[in-house]
Amino acid sequence: MKKLRRRVFIKTASAAVAAVSTGMLVSCNNQKETKTISINLGKTYEWKMVTSWPPRFPILGEYAGKIAEWIDKASSGRMKIHVYGGGELVPALEVFDSVSFGVAEMGHSVAYYWAGKAPAAQFFASVPFGMNAREMNAWLYFGGGLELWRELYADFNLYPFPSGNTGSQMGGWFNKEITTIKDLRGLKIRMPGLGGKVITKAGATSVLSPGGELYTNLERGVIDALEWIGPYHDYLMGFHKIAKYYYFPGWHEPGSTLELMVNKDAYEELPDDLKTIIKAAAEASNTLILSAFDAKNTEYYLKMQYEENVNFRKFPDEVIKSLKFFSEQVINEIVAKDEMSRKAYESYTAFKKKINGWFDISERNYI
Ligand code: CA
């Protein structure tokens, strides 16, 4: 192949100046058969990737950087992607619009942030009492989920890929024990998204605090409780130093799918090999990010348990039952108002029912 490439290069070098930008068809003899292959000699791409993560944020920011690195290497340097942390080029929560309008060609984020623009987007990230990471992947890749996600994002000139999952998150840090659903009444809890709407129905107040202010807000009592991610990221934030109880399970985020979104016009202009490289990089990140979360959460769960003596508490069944009841109300309200949400919900729920049955006899019994 090297030889072939050099031959093609020498043959076309003088004409390359005119041809490089449009790509060209090259006929070549490959031993027995003659093939016509398309080679975009010399055409390079410099793209920007904006993310919703602080610069170099553990796992998420790291893997946004790795995606860019893989694409660079796999394309032999034909595609360079400059990665920006949230706020470096555009604010963290403007990733969707920035990629949609082409300010950047790529974005790494999580779809529930865009609920205000496209309520159905939440089904492609995580919904309370929804599917876990493995179930989400099965639905997205093989159950029609990704097609629906692409249909939704096409209206915004975006092309999404699943690009990681946090796994089941934790229920959050509390200074008060939660023994009945009434204990949530009057609490100011940092819990964004649908989970925030659910706890509001239980009489709590959902407060939106940026990540950087969470520690001081909890310490000073501006908020009474908070949820963040899981043992690894929560440990790095130091919440175990200022909160009494660490509750589980993370009923509100059973497995949040992350996304790599590409500006659709920019994506469609790419030659097939670069499209495939981006797809493969997204798929690699989808596996590795989940594995990194699983490995790091295990390590830091043990650290919290044995070095920090963190008080782990399980939400009582009665509390979980009530939260599930309120979650169904919240989701039904969204589905009633938005046609695309209804479509996503129907596909999601039908798949969830089926796979829950299978996982119940296989995974749950095994565990
Ligand atoms: Ca969370």
Image (tube, rainbow, N blue to C red):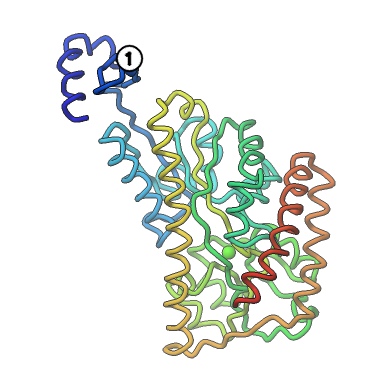
Q: Is residue 2 left or right of residue 212?
A: left
Q: Position of residue 60 (x, y in %)?
A: 44, 57
Residue 296 shown left or right of residue 208 in the figure: left
Mark 1 crowd level (few <14, some 14–19, many ≥20, 10 Å Cα): some
Horizontal and vertical percent position of residue 210: 54, 60
Q: The N terminus lies in which quarter of the figure? A: top left
- Name the residue nearer the viewer: 90 or 338: 338
Residue at 75%, 40% in the rendered image: 340
User: How many marks do you count on the picture?
Assistant: 1
Closer-to-camera residue (1/198): 1
Instruction: Examine the image and state in which quarter residue 291 appears.
Output: bottom left
* Mark 1 Cβ inside 8 Å of ligand 1: no
Q: Quadrant of residue 257?
A: bottom right
- Give the percent coordinates (x, y) of residue 119: 71, 45
Type of amino acid under label 1: Met
Residue at horizontal 40 percent and vertical 62 percent from the top: 58
- The residue shown at (45%, 58%) is 289
Relative side of 157 to 204, left or right: left
Q: Position of residue 185 (x, y in %)?
A: 78, 76
Q: The C terminus lies in which quarter of the figure?
A: bottom right
The residue pinned by badge 1 equals: 24
The image quadrant where one finds ligand 1 is bottom right
Q: Is residue 271 above or below residue 218?
A: above
Side of 102 relative to 179 (left or right)? left
Q: Residue drawn 56% across and 71% down?
A: 217
Residue 18 drawn above or below residue 55: above
Front-lying residue, 363 or 19:
363
Element class at badge 1: strand
